[in-house]
Image (cartoon, grey):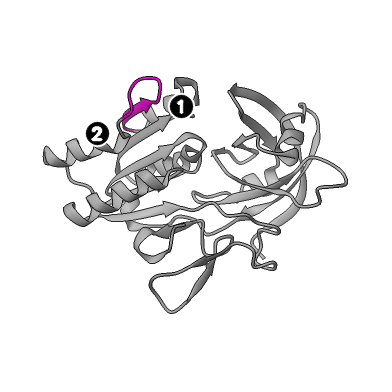
Amino acid sequence: MGWQYVNGIVTANHHIDEDVWRIEIHCPEIAGMCRPGHFVMLRSWQGEPFLPRPMAIFHYTNESFDVVYKVKGFGTKMLAAAAPGREITVTGPLGSAVEHSYLGKTIALVGRGVGITPLLPVAKAASEEGGSVISLLSARTEKLLVGKEDFELLGEVHTQTDEQQHSRVTDKLERLLNMGRHLDAVYVSGSKRLLSHCEELGARFGFQVYVFLEERMACGIGYCKGCAIEMRQGSRKYSLCCIQGPLYRAESVVVI
């Protein structure tokens, strides 16, 4: 068993903008095993609702990890109310780690809003492997460009907000490609519209496209089968996002 079910301690939990928050949890048992692509299940409350909430890992050290989350319902409202010092139940690390040869080459990371979250560990891993990283980040507001400063330390960054203009951040990627820039792979998270455009560009310019998928989960460890994803390619008709995912080759899955 590669995951653990333990208690962590909230060390920080602050509001970023609108309905988006960032929480830091001291939990060395899990943080020390985290890799790019992993996620955790969090529960900071007692009683109902009984199910924890799946969260992509945004940043991690050997002692702690951060997640960025959007307040949508009761569970995430309770998470936002968790003050420093609060004990929190953590299951993880879950999912399949990103271990691609592309990380040592030239990649682009395309993220929208909270969907930016799983891309930062990929950017760090690529930088450590000697790869070249182009990050294209979009959000409703400037404050919601989560981790922009962290991405800038790791490579070239292009940003766009709804406040500025209404075109797609991937239009900037298309311009770079038309200017002769080479890419080996693109990783997309947080927007089906941006994914669709990246798939078009991948077919035209010859690079592989990967997508981080987000599905409803009850357990996060494959028992409930609630996160099944329909496959377009391969021997499986369905894949469990919590086990084989959350990262997939875009051409292999049906994105609804």
Instruction: Identify the residue shown where x is 73% and y is 35%.
Output: 79
The type of residue carrying mark 2 is Lys
Q: How crowded is mark 2: few (under 14 residues within 10 Å), some or many (20 or more)?
A: some
The type of residue carrying mark 1 is Arg
Q: Residue 238's spot in the image, x, y percent? A: 51, 72
Q: Name the residue under label 2.
A: 172
The mark found on residue 28 in the picture is none
Name, please, the residue furthest toward the right. 47
Q: Mark 1 points at which residue?
A: 140
Query: Would residue 118 appear left or right of 7 to someone viewing this image?
Result: left
Q: Residue 100's spot in the image, x, y percent? A: 37, 57
The magenta segment = 155-166
Q: Residue 147's spot in the image, x, y percent? A: 47, 29
Q: Which of marks 2 and 1 is nearer the N terminus?
A: 1
Instruction: Identify the residue shown where x is 76% and y is 29%.
Output: 81
Whether pointer 2 and pointer 1 mark residues with C-beta atoms closer than 8 Å, the reply is no
